Image: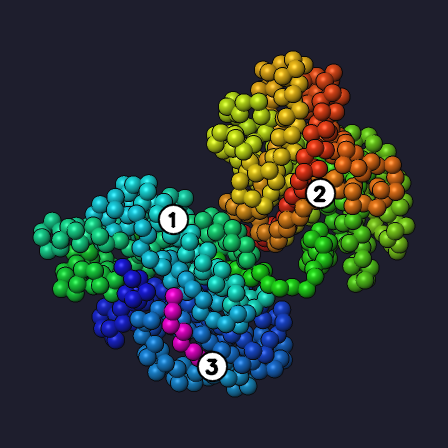
Amino acid sequence: MEVVQVLHMNGSGAGDFSYANNSLLQSKVILMTKPIVEEAINNLYCSSFPTNFTIADLGCSSGPNTLMAVSELIKVVEENRQKHNKQPIEYQVLLNDLPGNDFNTIFKSLPNFLEKLKMEIGDHDIGPCLFNGVPGSFYGRLFSSKSVNFIHSSYSLHWLSKVPEGLEGNKRNIYMVDTSPKSVVEAYYKQFQNDFELFLKCRREELVKGGSMVLTLLGRRSQDPTSKECCYIWELLAMALNDMVSEGIIEEEKLESFNIPKYMPSPTEMRIEIEKEGSFVVNRIQVSKMDWNIVYKDNGNKDDNGGYNVAKYMRAVAEPILISHFGEAIIDELFIRYGQIIVDRMAKEKLEFVNLTISLTNINSDREESPPIVEEAINNLYCSSFPTSLAIADLGCSSGPNALMAASELIKAVEIIRQKLKKKPIEYQVLLNDLPGNDFNTIFKSLPNFLQNLRREIGGDVGPCLFTGVPASFYGRLFPKKSVHFVHSSYSLHWLSKVPEGLEENKRNIYMTGNSPRSVVKAYYNQFQKDFSLFLKCRAQELVDGGRMILTLLGRRSQNPASKECSYIWELLGLALNDLVDQGIIEEEKLESFHIPKYMPSPIEIRIEVAKEASFVIDSIKVSQVDWNVSDNNEMNKAKSVDVSLKGSGYNVAKYMRAVAEPILISHFGEEVMDELFIRYREIIADRMAKETTQFFNVTVSLTKPRYMCKNVNVR
């Protein structure tokens, strides 16, 4: 089925089954989502006060709602423009739908629309409003690069670009139902993923820097794609079609070759795809519900025609696609039966549509050189409210020269802005967290000198800096609810809470390698998912609304969790341990029962887990790489007695790895083998570094806990 050719609303003029006469539900939805649209367009306009403003409405259809969204958008902008005494704006309105849409009717209505709009806005000097029709699928490019300020779409994006492939097993169903084979559900979900990713990629090219989108579509709350809240309306239509097959009115082959090209996602599925694509930040997601027959209830119609009214609405939506497959002759009979079925079900159960509304901002743009990611995050946090007290947590602080470095840089960044803006001094609370075995004594003893140096470097009137040690795992609660403004963690979060279960087949490997069984890789990934989800849940409770996190951890660019980018350094340590086993220094059983509790994720894996947990939005993710022997490029270290020969390079890397891994190795193998183990390890490293480029990959992610979380709205 060529969806582009046949998918459009019923445009039969003013007929009883036309979309124009059966679109009050969509009108209700547009009005219901108005606050989210207003918030998005206010923020967008007031950020730069543009004198040209381009609005695109995707899937505009033709009927009483076509220009409704545009009208509301222009009114909001004009209210702000007049409030701030800004110059008149030249509006360009881009109305998009598939080529089969009735653009003629829209264009004929424009003179009256513009006259009414100017009357509603007032006698103020409203700029020109230029309208364009843009026929084409929004699953492709529609507009010039960086030409659109705001994109709106309502009740369109649940339609797929095509019927998914591989639905042959969905016998006598026209959509997913709870008895559909797993392959059918997967086919629909895969098509949604492909389509929505393409939609986002196209819009990121068309939106200006900081441009916004508000998208409303039919969806579901349930994690089950076959749940009644999204599939039932189509299941009942299939029942009517099956009745006609049983009576010989429709051929069975015709029914079995017909499937609805639609997918109604959950908020989590939306978040995951947005985070994977990476060009947009989610500002808000709202879930709302509407009774199937809300339109007619609100109009005071208390008769029994509710089911027939719903069937009329569905006819206006689905008739063109049904006619293209089954022909026009059976349509009246089909919708009579459909109406009867709906009447029967509505008398027995409460039936609702579920809507998702999502507000997005485009962050994919060619920007000037931005400040370092940590500085940018803490600056934005401070400037959003100018707090007089600021709680900063450093998770996995360790003890050593870097233990107080993060706190120092964060305080300096805030103080530069505070003093520049002449704000009141801030009371800082610094929460230093690590596991109970960390050497907190050394940190605490260094504090007097640290504070003295900090005040000398900053100058001016610095408020009190209060330090606290918090000994516990960050895979659990650490701080009181809503008590922390900023969380920092560097080189800690790649450590798991425990060794994953199910690694028995990872013979003589201490971590994942290219030859590890798939079950081993899956076990590591499952443990990462559980741990990272728990980490996010805990921090979501502890951070204030609008609070920020910057997390840096070892990771990888590759989608393969066992790639050399992340596993090679441990694979070489495994080689050294295997040498000791072969020489009888270590027992083989000892080696086979040892595994590193670590996982180095890709940016996409982080995005997916953040989206699934849904408490945070990702502001940015950056991947950086550092040579294993970073000291080779460090002039300070070269000036000292660091051995930077190839042999010495291996020694330096082995020293670093010994500092990191020795405690966990001693706990399993004992202390007596350590010297010999790391002598062999450094020789292996030196040999590999002479033959290939070896690098660590770091992933740094900046997150915000939004002031607006996903809301549920019930409309009765």
What amino acid type is highlighted by mark number 1? Tyr
- Snapshot quadrant of residue 430: top right
In whole angstroms, how far apart are the C-alphas of marks 1 and 3?
38 Å
Q: Name the residue under label 2.
A: 627
- Snapshot quadrant of residue 627: top right
- Snapshot quadrant of residue 483: top right
| Quarter of the rendering occupied by the C terminus | bottom left
* Viewer-side residue, 644 vs 193: 644
Q: Position of residue 136 (x, y in %)?
A: 38, 69
- How many C-alpha atoms fall within 10 Å of the one at disc 2: few (<14), some, or many (≥20)? some
Q: Position of residue 379 (x, y in %)?
A: 72, 56
Q: Name the residue under label 1.
A: 189
Q: Name the residue under label 3.
A: 130
* Viewer-side residue, 602 vs 611: 602
**Could you tell me if the residues under marks 2 and 3 are in contact, i.e. CB atoms within 8 Å?**
no
Q: Residue at x 25, y 75 (%)?
A: 14
| Quarter of the rendering occupied by the N terminus | bottom left
Region in magenta: 131-137
The answer to whether residue 62 is visible is yes
**Numbered circles on residues, count:** 3
On the picture, is 490 further left or further right than 621? right
> With respect to residue 710, does 361 lie above or below?
below
The answer to whether residue 340 is visible is no
Q: Position of residue 257 (x, y in %)?
A: 22, 52
- Which callout, 1 or 2, points at the residue further toward the start of the chain? 1
Q: Residue at x 29, y 41 (%)?
A: 181
Q: Look at the numbered disc 1 and give the secondary structure of its residue.
A: helix
What amino acid type is highlighted by mark number 3? Leu
In whole angstroms, how far apart are the C-alphas of marks 1 and 2?
40 Å
What amino acid type is highlighted by mark number 2? Asp
* Viewer-side residue, 424 vs 304: 424
On the picture, is 66 further left or further right than 275? left
